[in-house]
Image (spheres, grey):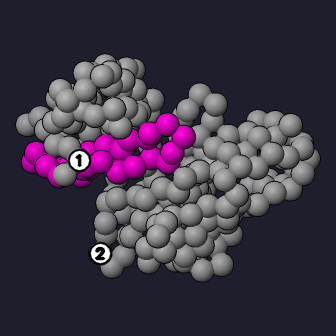
Amino acid sequence: DAKTTQPNSMESNEEEPVHLPCNHSTISGTDYIHWYRQLPSQGPEYVIHGLTSNVNNRMASLAIAEDRKSSTLILHRATLRDAAVYYCILSRGPGYALNFGKGTSLLVTP
Amino acid sequence: DTAVSQTPKYLVTQMGNDKSIKCEQNLGHDTMYWYKQDSKKFLKIMFSYNNKELIINETVPNRFSPKSPDKAHLNLHINSLELGDSAVYFCASSQVRPVFQETQYFGPGTRLLVL
């Protein structure tokens, strides 16, 4: 399985944008890039995913490098509720389990 | 309405006991999963079922036996519980066929403590 590398932790001020990086240099052509987050004492929650093009949804934006070897999850205005562990995961396709790494623990301060 | 529910939320038991955790999804999905999150917070897949058929079975002790009575339910039975089984167990579901949807939906977790 292709691996992802993320910083262990990041910190942001409330209402400021947050850019969470992820390296996946061994990504294969058919791997989708997924982001999930896990709030304290809760199950993981889907955030966004993409293949080649940048993606936007109501929660976040996903910027994917042209060579697909890295991606960045963008939270446009961090809130205290966004404090969570963010996981960057490469998905092999239908029915495959998600291979969670250590993720990035995001701290949001008022 | 809770999309993926698990019972119980907390489970405290003695070593050697047998226990079950239940999972139900009301999303109409055809695939369900069990993940384990250990004390170091690593989330690992244990099993997955598609339409009641086992499709993923990671290296998990035989003491763990999943059962899927129908595609909306995936239960996890654990025999002869050991201290190392203490963890949070998450159930998840997704849709694979006929239209594949990428998102997996997770339950709230069952916190198992073996004494």
Front-most of A61 and A63? A61
Residue B55 image position (x, y, % from top left): 54, 65
Front-most of B35 and A90? B35
In the structure shown, which secondary structural element does the residue marked by tag 1 occupy?
loop
Name the kind of residue labelled 1 in the image.
Met
- Seen at 70% across and 58% down, the residue is B8
Front-most of B62 and A13? A13
Name the kind of residue labelled 2 in the image.
Val
- Seen at 86% across and 37% down, the residue is B115
- Seen at 34% across and 59% down, the residue is B103
The span picked out in magenta is: A29-57
Is residue A70 at all visible to an observer of this figure? no
- Seen at 52% across and 70% down, the residue is B25
Q: Residues within 10 Å of mark 1 (few under 14, many from 20)?
A: few
Chain letter for the residue marked with disc 1 in the picture: A
Tell me: residue B73, above or below residue B80. below
Residue A52 image position (x, y, % from top left): 13, 47
Chain letter for the residue marked with disc 2 in the picture: B
Residue B44 image position (x, y, % from top left): 55, 43
Q: Quadrant of the C terminus of chain A?
A: top left
Magenta span has A38?
Answer: yes
Tag 2–tag 1 contact (CB < 8 Å):
no
Residue occupied by mark 1: A59
Residue occupied by mark 2: B99
Magenta span has B29?
Answer: no
Callout in the foreground (2, 1):
1
Is residue B110 at all visible to an observer of this figure? yes
Tell me: residue B17, above or below residue B102. above
In the structure shown, which secondary structural element does the residue marked by tag 2 occupy?
loop
- Circle on res. B19: none
